[in-house]
Image (cartoon, rainbow, N blue to C red):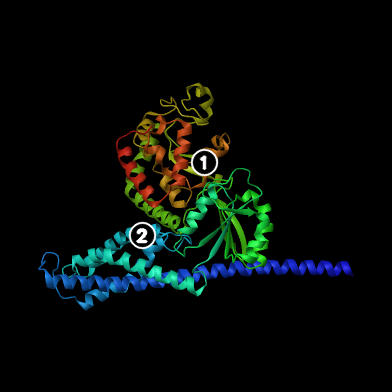
């Protein structure tokens, strides 16, 4: 019976500890969300204040100096300005959100000023477009320039006020922080914490961790070893403990984290120096916290826009090139017979196989004859490429030169097997010979064109080809897709295909 009581007690203690940890995490997340909501409301108010202030400065300047070319009307039309003010409280926070204004808990003032300046340029373009549509002849152009100055100023001012109010309300105005770790990374962590927008903490000092073997950094004030943590928590009025340690040491860190939790002190663990290249992220899976790793995190919204653009481009491309495809099909049928289309199994997103369509450019049964010309392979990797492939027909050589054989792949884009821009889809047999690091190029939907296509195609070695694809994946953006698409047009028109 005593054993049952002890087991029940341990179970209750473990359940209470889990509930306490979950409550603490929920409280911290809720606190940050409330602060972020306050920032959004402050920015909505700031843009209205900035617009009114810009109009007041403009009218004041009109009274002092006669600038007819900049001020078409000295009086401010209330109706005209109200039309613009309907959009601004929604558009300005959306622009700032796109610039990660609300996404970083440890954002510095330098980051905020940079984001506000970029946002002001984007806002000016938006207001110019609205003015062009609504009041082209009456809207004062100087208003746009003044708004680009007043908007960042008012937003930064209200952001600072919101931060101060939130800090005082939460009792974190002068929080005292203890750092575990004495190496260079701990110095960087201290500097980042000291330049945080959300308060400037007082760094009590550093504790030497048991997993550290080297000497402490010159500027580090070492208070002792980890045996002093409990004393510091009890006597030094610690508000937060930051661990400068890799997650490989998580097993050694957890006992000290529990010491902090026992007295209600929040803990932060630096995750940058983890052995994996991908950065961990805490995600919520139906209430279950998960530590997620991803080499690259692409915003789902941006990927959704990319897919919508792919569908639009595929539909427009099929309509515009439909007559050309019919002519190509007719010529292939008359010169080399059936079949007109070449169906080939390719590897797509994360290795999924799909049937890719191309106009047939080789003689019938060309794949069975590949072994006979294997000695002509010019590729330095698991890819078969021959510049003057004897299996290619005369009309096929013409289609390849002008990339007309790729037109049926627009239907693959429409189906969702491919994208307009992305790494070219490989053959499964080639994928089987990839090195481990090369398989990451399958982590994005394959495309009609890519960096390899516009950088020289077959003149580029296999390994460089792989690195270009990985660069595209790591640095992907809608802007990069647009640039690659634009560069592809002159490449195709120049007839540099093979």
Q: Residues within 10 Å of mark 2 (few under 14, many from 20)?
A: some
User: Quadrant where the N terminus lies?
Assistant: bottom right
Q: Is residue 68 left or right of residue 336?
A: left
Q: Is residue 127 left or right of residue 379?
A: left
Q: Where does the image place residue 488, in percent across and percent down from the top left?
A: 34, 41
Q: Where does the image place residue 78, in percent across and percent down from the top left?
A: 22, 78
Name the disc covering residue 95, or none.
none
Residue sticking out furthest to the bottom:
78
Residue at position x 42%, y 71% from top?
162
Which residue is at the front of the view, 460 or 288? 288
Question: Which residue does the numbered mark 2 point to in the structure image?
Answer: 113
SS assignment at label 1: strand
Question: Which residue does the numbered mark 1 point to in the structure image?
Answer: 346
Q: Is residue 148 left or right of residue 305?
A: left
Answer above or below: position of 303 versus 62. above
Point out the frontmost of discs 1 and 2: 2
User: Quadrant where the C terminus lies?
Assistant: top left
Which residue is at the front of the view, 75 or 404? 75
Residue at position x 59%, y 44% from top?
215
Chain-order first, disc 1 or disc 2: 2
**Quadrant in the rendering for residue 37:** bottom left
Residue at position x 58%, y 48% from top?
274
Answer above or below: position of 310 versus 347. below
**Quadrant in the rendering for residue 178:** bottom right
């Amino acid at each position: 019976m005593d054993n049952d009581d002890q087991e029940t007690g341990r179970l209750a203690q473990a359940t209470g500890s889990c509930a306490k940890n979950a409550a603490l995490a929920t409280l911290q997340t809720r606190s940050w969300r409330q602060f972020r909501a306050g920032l959004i409301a402050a920015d909505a108010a700031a843009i209205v204040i900035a617009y009114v202030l810009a109009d007041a400065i403009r009218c004041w300047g009109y009274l002092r100096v006669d600038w007819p070319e900049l001020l078409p009307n000295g009086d401010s039309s209330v109706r005209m300005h109200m039309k613009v003010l309907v959009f601004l409280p929604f558009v300005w926070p959306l622009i700032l959100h796109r610039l990660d204004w609300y996404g970083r808990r440890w954002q510095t003032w330098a980051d905020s000023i940079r984001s506000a300046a970029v946002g002001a340029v984007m806002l000016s373009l938006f207001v110019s477009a609205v003015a062009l549509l609504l009041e082209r002849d009456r809207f004062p152009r100087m208003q746009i320039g003044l708004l680009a100055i007043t908007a960042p100023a008012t937003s930064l001012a209200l952001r600072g006020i919101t931060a101060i109010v939130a800090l005082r309300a939460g009792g974190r105005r002068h929080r005292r922080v203890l750092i575990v770790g004495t190496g260079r990374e701990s110095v960087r962590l201290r500097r980042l914490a000291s330049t945080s927008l959300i308060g400037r903490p007082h760094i009590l000092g550093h504790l030497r961790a048991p997993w550290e073997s080297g000497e402490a950094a010159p500027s580090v004030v070492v208070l002792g070893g980890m045996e002093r943590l409990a004393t510091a928590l009890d006597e030094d009025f610690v508000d937060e403990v930051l661990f400068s340690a890799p997650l490989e040491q998580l097993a050694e860190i957890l006992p000290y984290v529990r010491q902090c939790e026992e007295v209600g002190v929040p803990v932060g663990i630096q995750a940058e120096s983890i052995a994996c290249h991908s950065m961990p992220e805490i995600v919520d899976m139906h209430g279950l916290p998960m530590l997620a790793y991803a080499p690259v995190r692409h915003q789902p919204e941006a990927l959704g826009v990319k897919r919508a653009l792919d569908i639009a481009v595929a539909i427009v491309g099929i309509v515009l090139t439909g007559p050309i495809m019919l002519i190509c099909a007719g010529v292939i049928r008359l010169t080399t017979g059936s079949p007109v289309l070449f169906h080939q199994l390719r590897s797509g997103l994360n290795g999924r196989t799909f049937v890719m369509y191309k106009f047939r450019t080789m003689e019938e049964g060309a794949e069975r004859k590949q072994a006979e010309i294997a000695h002509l392979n010019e590729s330095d990797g698991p890819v078969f490429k021959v510049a003057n492939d004897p299996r290619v027909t005369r009309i096929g050589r013409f289609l390849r030169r002008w990339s007309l054989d790729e037109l049926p792949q627009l239907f693959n884009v429409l189906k969702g097997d491919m994208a307009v821009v992305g790494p070219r889809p490989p053959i499964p047999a080639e994928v089987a010979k990839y090195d481990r690091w090369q398989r990451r190029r399958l982590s994005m939907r394959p495309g009609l064109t890519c960096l390899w296509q516009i950088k020289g195609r077959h003149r580029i070695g296999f390994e460089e080809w792989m690195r270009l694809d990985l660069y595209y994946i790591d640095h992907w953006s809608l802007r990069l897709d647009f640039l690659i698409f634009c560069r592809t047009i002159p490449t195709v028109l120049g007839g540099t295909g093979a």
